[in-house]
Amino acid sequence: MRFELVRALRNVKYLVFLVAVPVGFYLMWGRGSDAALVAMAVYAATGGALMAAGGGVADDRAQGWLRQLRVTPLSGARWLAGRVVLGVVMTLPGILAVCLAAVLVGHADLPPARWAALAGVLLAGSLPFCLLGLFLGLTLRGKTAQLGIVVVFFALAALGGVIGQGDLPGAWQRVRELTPSHSLLLYGGAAASGQGGRSAGLGQAGVLAAWTALAGAAVLARRRWSSDG
């Protein structure tokens, strides 16, 4: 775990893309807005989970490391748990950076309980993105995996309303409501406003749960039948 954390934190692209960029967006366009704070924190959380969980797996596959793990006592469940924990932990730098910018520059003044609720929502809500990143890392190879993760991240961010404003036309709005990024955005906004999960609704909880279950099943199936990981 320590090796993986150090490897991720030494990745300049990770630090720029998932720490500097959301902080910059917040300072340029949303300073002083709680909605912008939540959106950029969700940006950091979802991107960090996708890239930390999936990018490292793609590198390990390319080096043959995952094949070597198959002959060790490490079970598939323990491997999966470790990767998920890594993905969740690696959301913290971006989330903390955005929140710190909101306090120091945006003069955000949320009560401690709301900060804690927002952090809890973001960490828990990053789980389906960790699993989705793992699936992409187990399915795609090398630079294709990195590109695929970035494409999926921006697609979910745009469809979910994390980046961009306003409703989408026609059926696209329904698609938005089915994305995990949109559900996490709603829950993050509810936590920051002190409304808890009431304003997000059970439907959004179901969306996040469904994405988590499907992505987790896909990861287990892909690893079980894969010859190289």
Image (tube, rainbow, N blue to C red):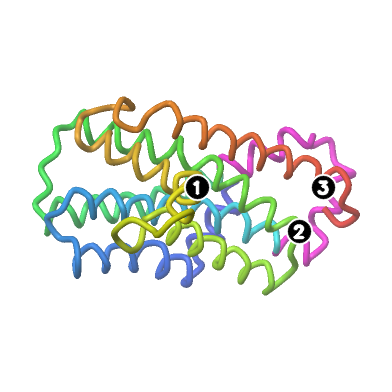
Asked if residue 131 lies left or right of residue 44, the reply is: right
User: CA–CA distance between discs 2 and 1?
Assistant: 21 Å
Q: Residue furthest front?
A: 170
Q: Mark 1 is on which residue type?
A: Thr
Magenta stretch?
59-85
Compare marks 2 and 1 and give the one earlier in the sequence: 2
Dot 3 amino acid type? Leu
Dot 3 crowding, Cα within 10 Å, few <14, some 14–19, many 20+: some
Q: Given the image, on which type of amino acid does mark 2 rest?
A: Thr
Q: Which residue is mark 3?
A: 69
Q: Is residue 190 above or below residue 227?
A: above
In the rendering, at what x and y percent does residue 52 appear? 55, 55
Q: In the rendered image, which residue does mark 1 sit on? A: 179
Dominant secondary structure of the magenta stretch? helix
Q: In front: 198, or 171?
A: 171
Q: How far apart are the alpha carbons under marks 2 and 3?
A: 17 Å
* Residue 122 belongs to the span the image colors magenta: no
In the image, is residue 101 above or below residue 184? below
Residue 76 vs residue 165, the one in the foreground: 165
